Structures are given as structure tokens and as C-alpha cells.
Image (cartoon, rainbow, N blue to C red):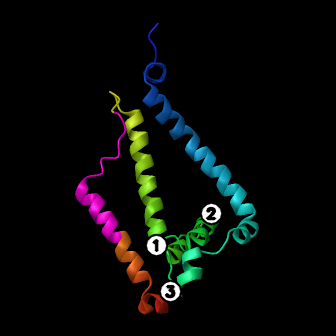
Amino acid sequence: MKQSYLKTMLSRDKNYRTAFWLAVLLPIGSAVAAVVVGCNSGYFAHLLPPCALNTLTGLHCLSCGATRATLALVRGDLLTALYYNPLYFAFLCWLGYLYARLLISLIRRPYQKYSLHITLPWGIAAIAAVLLFFFVRNTPFYRLLFY
């Protein structure tokens, strides 16, 4: 009897098996975490300490507002999440893109090993965008608009 493609790949390739279980368990774990955080959003928000960089220097770090953005996303409020931290929102979109690529690589025949394929120009552009966001975020103009 001929084995299915999925069964063959799960039995032969360790990388495929890892990617498959990641692809299966990630949405389930994310949904459970969203339900837990959504039901207890007021409780979790007060447990976390304030940002150390903001407390010491008054500057907003790259992840300032990420907790509030996560709670807004769990409630389904995309615009508020974007308002709290646009870089975090863009990072989550990038993770969604990587997840979609992972699913596509699992479905394709023949199986192609999953890799990020981040080239040097894209890496430099990402670092430049992060640094630019950090500096722009801490200008008085940005604070006037968003705080």
C-alpha cells in the first residue's frame, strides 16, 4: 500500500516533522493564549513592570506600547494596536508572512526546506527602519501627535 505524502515526510525528515508540528501547534497555542489574556486583560496589564529605559531616561524604547498593542489586538482593535506601537504591529505582520511561507513550504511537493532568505540589503533596511523609528518616536513632534 502506498503511503501518503504527509506520512512519508513525517516519518523520514526531522526538519519536516519539526516544521509540521510548529505549523499545527502555533495557531492552537496562540488561540488559547488570546483567550486567556483577553479574559484577564486587566489583570495582566498591572503585573508587568514599567519600561526601564523610559523610567531612567524618559525615552520610549522599541517595545514601549507592545503590551497595550497586544491587548488591543486580542480585543480585535487593530487601529488602537497600530497607534500604540506601529513597529510591533509591523513585526507581527512579518511573523504572519513567515508563518504563511512555512505553511506553503509544507504543502509544496517536492518539499523544500524552510528558510528565511533574508539578504544583506533587506537586513540593513530593517535595521535602518528600526533605528529611524526609535529616533523619530522620541522627537517632540511624534509625542505631540501620538501621546
Q: Nearer the viewer, residue 98 or 123?
A: 123
Figure quadrant of residue 38:
bottom right
Residues tagged 1 and 3 counted as in contact (Cβ below 8 A): no
**What's the residue type where badge 3 is placed?**
Phe
Q: Nearer the viewer, residue 100 or 21?
A: 21
- Mark 3 / mark 2, whichever is N-terminal: 2
Tag of residue 86: 1
Horizontal side of residue 57 vs 75, given as left or right: left
Label 2, on which residue?
Answer: 74
* Relative to 101, residue 63 above or below: below
* Crowdedness near tag 2: few (<14), some (14–19) or many (≥20) residues, C-alpha within 10 Å: many
**What's the residue type where badge 2 is placed?**
Val
Instruction: Label 3: state its secondary structure.
Output: helix
* Crowdedness near tag 1: few (<14), some (14–19) or many (≥20) residues, C-alpha within 10 Å: some
What segment is highlighted magenta in the picture?
113-129
Residue 34 horizontal/vertical position (percent): 65, 57
Viewer-side label of 3, 2: 3
- Mark 1 / mark 2, whichever is N-terminal: 2
Tag of residue 146: 3
Instruction: Label 1: state its secondary structure.
Output: helix
**What's the residue type where badge 1 is placed?**
Pro
Cα gap from disc 1 to disc 3, whole angstroms? 11 Å
Figure quadrant of residue 70:
bottom right
Cα gap from disc 3 to disc 2, whole angstroms? 21 Å
- Mark 1 / mark 3, whichever is N-terminal: 1
Instruction: Label 2: state its secondary structure.
Output: helix
Q: Which residue shows up at 30% across the image and 59% down it? A: 123
